[in-house]
Image: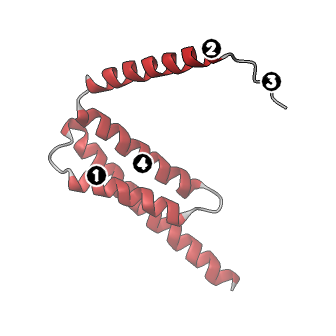
């Protein structure tokens, strides 16, 4: 059984400190241009797709969802992603190609073992 020996005062301090830290984080985030935050999220989704594609066996459904999310942002926000837009478009093209190659290889392997 875990030792839950915090007092109500300590819990209130922890909650207060957490709320203060959250407020500070929100303030710092508000100072960053939205374009940079969106690009960062796109790259996170790209990495998520790559992780699922490189899994053994590849998780195509999950990879496709992440790739589609990248596409929604990159293609849907065309002209609004700043200097990184060309890089994001190239990354999207590359992850799509990788997806097709991996899916084709999996289908070929299934046919050979059938």
- State the residue at coordinates (35%, 53%): 70
19, above or below 56, in the image:
above
* Mark 3 and mark 1 residues within 8 Å of each other at the beta carbon: no
Q: CA distance from mark 1 to mark 4?
A: 10 Å
Label 4 environment density (alpha carbons within 10 Å; few <14, some 14–19, many ≥20): many
Question: Foreground residue, 27 or 6?
Answer: 6
* Residue wearing tag 3: 3
- State the residue at coordinates (36%, 56%): 69
* Residue wearing tag 4: 45
* Mark 1 and mark 4 residues within 8 Å of each other at the beta carbon: yes
* Residue wearing tag 2: 10
- Which residue ends up furthest to the left in the rendered image? 79
- Quarter of the image containing the N terminus? top right
**Labels 1, 2: front one:** 2
- Quarter of the image containing the C terminus? bottom right
**Which one is earlier in the sequence, the residue at label 1 or at label 4?**
4
**Which one is earlier in the sequence, the residue at label 1 or at label 2?**
2
56, above or below 87, in the image:
below
Q: Secondary structure at mark 3?
A: loop
- Which residue ends up furthest to the right in the rendered image? 1
- State the residue at coordinates (29%, 57%): 72
* Residue wearing tag 1: 73
**Which one is earlier in the sequence, the residue at label 3 or at label 1?**
3
Label 1 environment density (alpha carbons within 10 Å; few <14, some 14–19, many ≥20): some
Q: Is residue 10 left or right of residue 37?
A: right
Rendering coords of residue 82 (x, y %): 19, 38
Q: CA distance from mark 3 to mark 4?
A: 39 Å
Q: Secondary structure at mark 1?
A: helix
Q: Secondary structure at mark 4?
A: helix
């Amino acid at each position: 059984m875990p030792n839950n020996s915090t007092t109500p005062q300590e819990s209130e301090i922890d909650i207060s400190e957490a709320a203060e830290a959250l407020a500070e984080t929100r303030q710092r985030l508000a100072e960053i241009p939205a374009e940079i935050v969106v690009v960062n999220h796109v790259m996170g989704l790209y990495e998520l797709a790559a992780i699922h594609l490189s899994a053994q066996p590849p998780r195509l459904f999950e990879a496709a969802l992440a790739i589609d999310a990248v596409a929604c942002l990159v293609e849907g926000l065309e002209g609004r992603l700043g200097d990184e837009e060309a890089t994001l478009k190239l990354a999207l093209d590359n992850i799509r190609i990788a997806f097709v190659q991996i899916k084709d290889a999996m289908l070929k392997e299934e046919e050979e073992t059938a």
